[in-house]
Image (cartoon, helix red, strand yellow):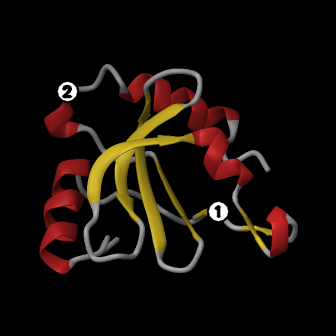
Amino acid sequence: MKLFTKEIEKALAANASVEESTRRPVVKLFGGGACTWLISERIDDDTLYGLCDLGMGYPELGYVSQSELERLRFGMHGAGIEVVERDMYFTPEKTLSEYAKDARAAGMIVA
């Protein structure tokens, strides 16, 4: 499954040159139970950067592989339904660092 539209791809690439203190997430992904990612930029062909929350109470800023997110499946032996989806209605209201501060205080991404 392709997670990003061409417009999102362009925004992720452009966001890499935006001052970090003003950078906003471009896309919100969710899936696999309580997992949530607020992705702000593309580092290279497969590496994304953003706020990652795997549902264990410790959200953190970091890197994630787009191809791994696209391959995640729920079910036996990787067969079944796709796990990660894009929140079609997400509109960022804060900078990524503000989301990170709030997420650390709450133990989860609050968006």
Instruction: Give amino acid for label 1.
Output: Val
* Front one among 51 and 67: 67
Badge 2 amino acid: Glu
Q: Residues within 10 Å of mark 2 (few under 14, many from 20)?
A: few
Choose top left, top right, bottom left or bottom right for residue 73: bottom right
Q: Which residue is mark 2?
A: 19
Q: Residue furthest front?
A: 77
What secondary structure is found at the residue carrying circle 1? Answer: loop
Q: Are marks 1 and 2 in contact (CB under 8 Å)?
A: no
Q: Residue 9: x and y, percent?
A: 59, 32
Left/right of residue 68 with respect to residue 17 in the rendered view: right
Mark 1 and mark 2 lie on one chain; the one further toward the N terminus is: 2
Residue appearing at x 28%, y 64% in the figure: 59
Q: Give the CA distance from mark 1 to mark 2.
A: 28 Å
Relative image position of residue 36 (x, y in whole percent):
46, 66
The picture places residue 31, in percent across and down from the top left corner, at 59, 70
Residue for point 27% across, 25% down: 18
Look at 40% across and 75% down and name the residue there: 55
